[in-house]
Image: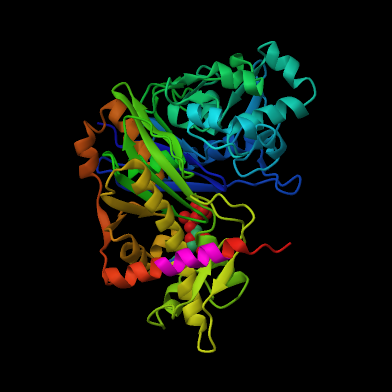
Amino acid sequence: MKKFILAIDQGTTSSRAILFDHQGKYTYSAQREVQCIYPNEGWVEEDPIELWVSVVDVVNEVLIKAGATWDDVDSIGITNQRETTIVWDKKTGKPIYNAIVWQSRQSLEICEKLMDKKPFIHAKTGLLINPYFSASKIRWILDNVGGAQEKANRGELLFGTVDTWLIYKMTNGKTFATDSTNASRTMLYNIFDLKWDDELLKLFNIPKSMLPEVKYSIDDYGISSYFSDKVHIYGVAGDQQASLFGHTCFEPGESKNTYGTGCFMLMNIGDKPILSSKGLLTTIAWSSPKGVKYAFEGSVFIGGSAIQWLRDGLKIIKDAPDSEVVASKCEDSGGVYLVPAFVGLGTPYWDDEVRGSVFGITRATTKYQLVRATLEGIAFQVKDVFDVMKQESNIKIKSLQVDGGATANSILMQFQSDICRIEIKKPEVVETTALGVAFLAGLKSGYFKNVDEVYEAHKYQAHYKPKMLARVASDKCRGWSKAVAAARTFRND
Ligand code: ADP
C-alpha cells in the first residue's frame, strides 16, 4: 500500500498541497499565496500561469518535506475555487486572458440583460443569474478579447474552471475534463439531464467545442504525467462540495457550514434535485458511477470579515481570537442586534442594497456587548440559511458540521447551536476541503475500501449542544427578524 494521497487545493488566495495517510490524517502540507489582480472597480482576476506554477511549487515542496517520492503517492485529488473562468488557446496551451475570479463583477451587464430568463436558467441549472457563475465570464472574454469569438467558432479555444486548467497542465494536455460539481457552477450544465445544455449554450452564444468533458467526481482523469508516469488523478470536486464530502455528509439532511470570510452552508438533499423558491442554489454535491447526489447551498456574505471590521475598523479587539475574550466579559448582548449587511445580504434575502445596522443600543451598552452582538449577527445569518434549507427540503437536518477560521470561537459555536437547536460538530481535521478530495481519490484507487472506512477516518474535536432555554433562543431569533426587517427599510441614498 502506498503511503499517501496527495490533495491539491487551489483556492482564491492560496494554493495548497496536503498529504493524507490511511487514517485520513493530515501529515504534511505546503502553501503558496496567489495574487489577485484588480484592473477595475469590482473586477477580480488572477494569472492562470501563476496558479499553475504555485501548484507545481507546493506539490514539489510537500513531497520534499515528507521525504517522499512519487512512488509513495497513491493518487491525486484536486479541489478548487469554483466558477473562476479560464480560456486558453488549444494549440499553444496559453491563456488568452487572465482567470476571471468568481467574485468578479465585470460581467454584471451581461447578467442584467438576461434577467427575464431567470426562471428558465434556474429550472435547468439550479442557479440564480449572477456574475459569479462562469457563463457570463466566458461571454465577457469572447466579447472583449480581439478575435476571440471567431477563434472560438473555429474550435481553437478551450474553456475551463481551475480544476480543468490544472488537469490539462498536469496531464500535458491529454485530459480536457471537469467534474460534475464544477460543471454545475458554470450555468451551462443541466443538473437534471446531466449534460451541457444546448439552449443555454445558444443563449450565451458559446460554442460547445470550448467545453470540457464532464466526468464523475470519482473518476480516472488520467496520469499526471507532468509529475510522474504512474500517478493518476482520481478525485475532483469544487471546494464547497469537497468540504461536504470531507465532512462525511453522505446522508440527506447532513450539512456543513464553513465560517470563513463569508459563510457557505451546504446540505445533502439526496439523489433528486429540488429547486428552491427562497434563494437557495441547487448544486451537484458529488457524482460517481453509482449516481449523483445533490445539495442545497446558501451563502452569507459577511462572516469572519465582521470580526476583521471589529479589529481594523472599530479597533475594539486586537485580533480575531480576542473577539471571544472580549465577548466573554458580558453575559449576553443586552438586547443589541448587529446586522452585518456591509455588502448586502445573501441567502435568503438576496438584497444588494441593504447596509449594516445596529439596533437596541442604550446608555448602558458596552463594547463587550457590541462584540457579542457581532458574533451573534454571524450566527443569526447562518440560522436564516439553515431555516430555509429545512423548509424547502422538508428534510430534518440531523447535524451541522463546521469548519473555517471562525470555528475557533466557542461563543459563536455555542450560540449557533443554541439558536438552531442542533448539535454542532467540529472535526479534528480542519482541512476538510482537501480531505474531501483525498477521500474521493482514495475511494477510486481502493486506498479507502468504502465509505465506512472513510467514516472511520473521521473524528471530532468538539461538540456543541443547545444549552440556552428554547424560549430564550426563540425570543432572540424574533428580535433578529425584526432587526433585519428594519435594516431593509433603510436606504442611504
Ligand atoms: P477564508 O478561507 O475565507 O480566508 P478562513 O477560514 O481562513 O477564511 O477564516 C478567516 C476568518 O475567520 C477571518 O475573517 C477571521 O476574522 C475569522 N476568525 C479567525 N479566528 C477567529 C476567532 N477566534 N473568532 C472569530 N473569528 C475568527
Image coordinates for residue 449, horizontal then vertical, percent:
21, 31
Q: From this viewpoint, is residue 226 visible?
A: no
Position of residue 393 in the picture relative to residue 453 (left or right): right
Mark yes or no: residue 191 visible: yes
126 relative to 464, above or below: above
Most extreme residue toward the right is 146
Query: Which of 78 and 308 lies nearest the eye of the viewer?
Result: 308
Magenta stretch: helix, strand or loop mostly: helix
Is residue 338 toward the left or the right of residue 143 in the image?
left
Measured as percent of width and height from the top left, residue 339 is found at 53, 66
Q: x, y (%) of residue 141? A: 71, 29
How many badges with numbers are in the image? 0
Viewed as shown, does residue 162 lie left or right of 481?
Answer: right
Residue drawn where x is 37% and y is 33% of the image: 294
Most foreground residue, 177 or 198: 198
Residue 174: in magenta span: no
Q: Residue at the location (56% across, 78% down)?
A: 316
Say if the magenta span includes residue 483. yes
> What x and y, as percent, mark residue 343?
62, 57
Please say if 74 is above or below 461: above
Q: Quadrant of the N terminus?
A: top left
Asked where in the image residue 306 lies, by quadrant, the reply is bottom right
For the record, the magenta segment spans 478-486
Give the residue at the far top of this rendering: 154
Indicate the quadrant where residue 108 lies.
top right
Task: Decide: is 29 above or below 449.
Answer: below
Quarter the C terminus occupies = bottom right
Q: Compare residues 455 and 303 and report the one nearer the observer.
A: 303
User: In the displayed image of the protein, which residue is found farthest to the bottom?
Assistant: 363
Quarter occupied by residue 3: top left
